[in-house]
Amino acid sequence: MDVLVIGGGIAGFTTAYHLAGKGRSVLLLERETRPAYHSTGRSAVFFRGSHGVARVRALCRASRPFFADPPRTLPERRLASPRDALFICSSADLPALEAFVQGARESGTPIERLAPEEACARVPVLRPEYVGGAALETGGMDIHLPALLATLQEGILARGGRIELGAEVREIERKDGLWRVRTSACDYSAPLLVNAAGAWSDRIARLAGARPIGLVPKRRTVMTFRPDPAAGIARWPMVLEVRERFYFRPWGEELLASPADQTPVPPCDAQPEEADCRLLLQRLAEATTLPLGPASRLRRWAGLRSFVPDERPVLGWDPDLPGFFWVAALGGFGIETSPAVGEVAAALLTGEPFPPHVAAEGVCAADFSPERLRIQKNAGG
């Protein structure tokens, strides 16, 4: 075995997939009995080029080709469907909208300002008195998560990789040039160890003897609603308040919405809090005429989005431990950046250059290296 990958979310799967594609023998370990149980499986799974800070947007751009023209599979799968993103704001927040649009344009994202009445025409449940400004980003996509995970999983297995579920990591040690990992299922060893454990990445690092990176998991709440059948929501764009006070989007035959909460919590099986659900209902009532009564409420859940202070992923070799590699801190953009994240990780792990379409977007290893966090901390005193 060449590489052990700890974590069965999108970070672990994309890394294992691209490593297997380079001929490396890979074993992916996941403590849950099904993959993508935590952050990945609870995401809003939407692709937009304007998401995140500038370096994250570069990863988004580099990931677009994978979703738009995915690998051939049997059966053939569609990984994404087009959907625009509509950003709205109150009159008081027009400067914030203008700054957002300018930043999106500078990163190459196709976006245009819309008059408030145009926004309300596209999404008739918006209250005209609430919408003081709007902008439409084109080129967004709904990502079909089951199809994406199936493609990655089948690619790993077809290339000789292995996936072990229900394998909770209990001990890690470095001995005789190998990483030895004891799990609840079995013991494994390999010269390279990838820490892709999501919100638990700092805990895995401590087990291995590495310094934590200061990862902060943050809870994000989601509710779904039964829309008016006559509303024709399938044609709606995703709607986002520009200061991230809420968003909503079609979700099959349901409407998915979130208050865009970011409550710091320990790594856990996140559950929705009543206060966050009430906040979402309040914000939606202020901005829309959506039916929000108890009869319209269908489901609710929460997930974790994990960040370091500069809100960039951590991708690279640990500065102190040989053979220990980080794929962590994917925030709220893990799925949409996953193709490029996997390609970057696999290139760094194998010592190969980045693929041309990744390098063309200005993706630089130093921007995501764990070492940068120490440099930032030392510079800040």
Image: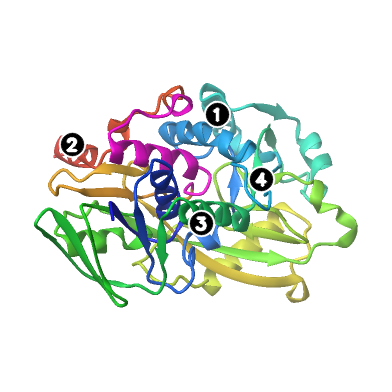
Q: CA distance from mark 2 to mark 1?
A: 28 Å
Asked whether the beta carbons under mark 1 and mark 4 sit within 8 Å of each other, the answer is: no
* Residue visible at 32% across and 73% down in the picture: 168
Tag 4 or tag 1, which sits nearer the N-term? 4
Name above or below for residue 144 compared with residue 141. below
For marks 4 and 3, give the one nearer the viewer.
3
Tag 2 or tag 3, which sits nearer the N-term? 3
Magenta segment range? 333-358
Instruction: Residue under label 3, please give it.
Output: 153
Q: Residues within 10 Å of mark 3 (few under 14, many from 20)?
A: some
**In front of the other: 342 or 332:** 342
Q: CA distance from mark 1 to mark 3?
A: 33 Å
Tag 3 or tag 1, which sits nearer the N-term? 1
Tag 4 or tag 2, which sits nearer the N-term? 4
* Quarter placement of the C terminus: top left
Left or right: 134 with respect to 336?
right
Q: Does residue 355 show up magenta in the picture?
A: yes
**In front of the other: 313 or 129:** 313
Q: Residues within 10 Å of mark 1 (few under 14, many from 20)?
A: many
Instruction: Residue under label 1, please give it.
Output: 104
Q: Residues within 10 Å of mark 4 (few under 14, many from 20)?
A: many
Instruction: Residue under label 4, please give it.
Output: 80
